[in-house]
Image (tube, coloured by chain):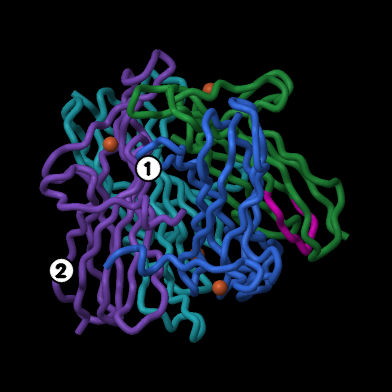
Chain colours: A blue, B green, C purple, D cyan
């Protein structure tokens, strides 16, 4: 079995699990810029002890590179857990992160995300470096 | 040996490893807000294949709670690694992340960070929930 | 761009990056057993500051399930980094982990691994639960 | 607030949250050996969607070193979550991992673990390298 049969995709405006990558169309080589990765931008995803987004991983594949590089992992770990019972805790982590990165060539940003009951999802976005 | 002898702290304006927590002084209960965690805000930290910040973990301890909750982990994974040799790769992850969280009681945000050669560092910031 | 174009596979006896999953052919429902995941079982992979295996993720897809579940993430974080320079440090983490899990239905274990310069690799292994 | 006020310790034979480190008393310099880290070795910890051990981190502090190195992170991610409701899923990750490492000097292994409702715990174990 391959991950390609398991990593789901779709239009994030209609499918709430698809990770959204927000980044400039074009950035300057070697200059820091921010990338926002999130799940549920259009249709909020549940955020409960029993059902939530656990993490988003961000990769970068340079246009003439053979292999992708992992840029970052962003974990969302608080979902109302508490000794008094589920969903009674004081903290909830939303599936949203802003990263700051530098690139020195054009390529593609790729995000993989994981819902604790709906599995793996992906998206990608091209980015130009000048 | 205890972690208390290993987790270092200090003034982030003078010691570049200390994680910085930027959050509102006061937030509304159950409403999402952003927290920025970073290392090197005043004095940039190196970002090379051999020396870089690997991750920041963010926790929340409610004022009347016994235990802290992990809010998130933010990993910074690209530091110029490449098959052509260190520091020749196309991507560099800066030690900076913005998280989005909801709280329903006052307490303290705590950050722990890790430099791959200078070890563990910490900081904290109180936050009021009304 | 999809992850299916990036996650590489192959025969782990000939390609050192392919993760190896070692688990019983058959286990008893709800009884703990161990799974070993590793990279480089036949042909050792380099373990240097500049080139190493960072992590292996293990998932389980039940035979009649729509979505996979993440079983665990195993990070290998020490690779000779040191203030005195790369590959002079006291600790090296080998790309090997043993996990302990319980399953209550048959399905497939899937491993994804990441080399910091050779990208993403995968493998899978069926497991019967009686 | 400091992490030293939050990271709990105790005797793992009486307190089920304390991580247990099992490693040889003495190892040969630069030769791979295994370390087992676990929670609940004597008194099993619950493993439910609402209450479970999330991760154990392992560090090494060389005896003449200023800083600890992170050896590995071991995440336990499946706890019966399912679209049909909590604790109905097919997979459960036990808080147990075996790592394989190489050391070239004596020092101390330190483990930090996290229960999703009972917070942070620690333990340590000296190890001699000859
Ligand atoms: Fe979901
Ligand atoms: Fe440093
Ligand atoms: Fe490699
Ligand atoms: Fe507990």
Q: Is residue D103 above or below residue D55?
A: above
Q: Are marks 2 and 1 on the same chain?
A: no
In what quadrant of the picture does the N terminus of chain B appear?
top left
Query: Bounds of the magenta span?
Result: B99-107
- Position of D10 with respect to B43 (left or right) is left
Between marks 2 and 1, how big is the CA–CA gap? 25 Å
The residue singled out by tag 2 in the image is C24
Q: Residue at x 28, y 25 (%)?
A: D106
**Most common secondary structure along the magenta stretch:** strand
User: Could you say which quadrant of the image residue A15 lies in?
Assistant: bottom right
Q: Secondary structure at mark 2?
A: loop
Q: Secondary structure at mark 1?
A: strand
Disc 2 within 8 angstroms of ligand 4 (CB): no
For this rendering, which residue is in front, D9 or B41? Answer: B41
Name the subunit of mark 1: D
Q: Residue at x 59, y 68 (%)?
A: A11
In what quadrant of the picture does the C terminus of chain B appear?
bottom right
Q: Position of residue D102 (x, y in %)?
A: 24, 32
The residue singled out by tag 1 in the image is D72
Name the subunit of mark 2: C
For this rendering, which residue is in front, B30 or C116? Answer: C116
Q: Residue at x 43, y 40 (%)?
A: A69
Q: Position of residue B89 (x, y in %)?
A: 44, 28
């Amino acid at each position: 079995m391959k991950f390609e049969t398991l990593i789901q995709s779709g239009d994030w405006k209609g499918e709430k699990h698809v990770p959204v990558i927000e980044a400039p169309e074009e950035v300057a080589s070697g200059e820091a810029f921010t990338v926002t990765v999130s799940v549920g931008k259009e249709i909020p995803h549940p955020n409960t002890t029993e059902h939530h987004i656990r993490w988003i991983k961000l990769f970068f594949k340079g246009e003439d590179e053979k292999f992708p590089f992992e840029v970052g992992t962003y974990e969302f770990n608080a979902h109302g857990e508490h000794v008094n019972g589920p969903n009674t805790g004081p903290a909830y982590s939303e599936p949203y992160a802003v990263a700051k990165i530098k690139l020195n060539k054009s390529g593609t940003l790729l995000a993989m995300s994981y819902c604790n009951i709906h599995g793996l999802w992906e998206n990608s976005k091209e980015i130009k470096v000048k």
